[in-house]
């Protein structure tokens, strides 16, 4: 509900590979980008949620300018020194602690929401559909049997026995 930017920072691991870390959301007022809080220097321990590379349409921004609309790791690999991991992190916690001006990205909601009721609805439709199909097959088979075997009480010419008149 507020204008702002996410601060994405490269973190060089012990192996030399780079992982991008979304350090948090920085609220802005207007179109000007405020001065970004500096990342901690030295060794940093980071815990985060792993995210896949994002793809989008439209203006993606210019990675060389430091402004992007989504985290496209292929595009960002051109401006990062060193090999880039195939995913990026949303910061959960870090040691030393993160700058307080950055609001961490909240964890995703884990509730089932309306999806459970939709799943139950489609399950019910499936049961009704399969059950109805079985009933139609049985009704068709019964109709064919009845057409092949006439009901009792009806005498066909082949069932009648003929007797010759006696003299």
Image (cartoon, rainbow, N blue to C red):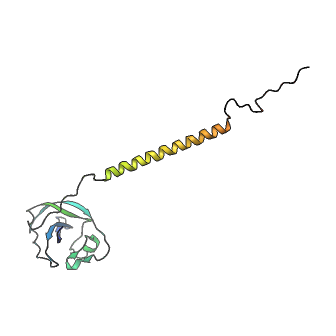
Residue 88 appears left or right of 39 = right
Q: Nearer the viewer, residue 27 or 118?
A: 118
- Please tell me which residue is depicted at 40% across the width and 46% down the height of the picture: 124
Q: Position of residue 13 (x, y in %)?
A: 17, 65
Q: Is residue 165 above or below residue 108?
A: above
Residue farthest toward the top in the current orientation of the protein? 167
Q: Is residue 151 above or below residue 84?
A: above
Q: Is residue 144 above or below residue 67?
A: above
Q: Nearer the viewer, residue 124 or 156?
A: 156
Q: Quadrant of residue 162?
A: top right
Q: Is residue 96 above or below residue 146?
A: below
Q: Position of residue 163 (x, y in %)?
A: 84, 24
Residue 115 appears left or right of 5 = right
Residue farthest toward the right in the current orientation of the protein? 167
Q: Nearer the viewer, residue 13 or 129?
A: 129
- Please tell me which residue is depicted at 44% across the width and 45% down the height of the picture: 127
Q: Quadrant of residue 80?
A: bottom left
Residue 141 appears left or right of 163 = left
Task: Give the position of the N terminus as an image quadrant.
Answer: bottom left
Q: Position of residue 88 (x, y in %)?
A: 23, 65
Q: Position of residue 125 (x, y in %)?
A: 42, 48
């Amino acid at each position: 509900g507020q204008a702002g930017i996410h601060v994405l920072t490269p973190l060089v691991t012990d192996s030399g590979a780079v992982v991008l870390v979304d350090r948090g959301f920085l609220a802005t007022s207007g179109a000007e980008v405020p001065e970004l809080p500096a990342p901690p220097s030295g060794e940093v321990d980071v815990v985060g949620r792993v995210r896949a590379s994002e793809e989008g349409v439209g203006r993606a921004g210019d990675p060389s300018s430091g402004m992007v609309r989504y985290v496209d790791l292929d595009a960002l690999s051109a401006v990062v020194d060193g090999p880039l991991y195939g995913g990026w992190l949303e910061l959960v916690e870090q040691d030393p602690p993160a700058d307080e001006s950055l609001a961490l990205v909240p964890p995703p909601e884990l509730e089932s929401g309306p999806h459970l009721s939709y799943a139950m609805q489609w399950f019910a439709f499936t049961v009704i559909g399969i059950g109805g199909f079985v009933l139609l097959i049985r009704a068709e088979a019964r109709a064919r049997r009845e057409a092949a075997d006439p009901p009792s009480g009806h005498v066909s010419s082949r069932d009648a026995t003929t007797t010759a008149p006696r003299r």
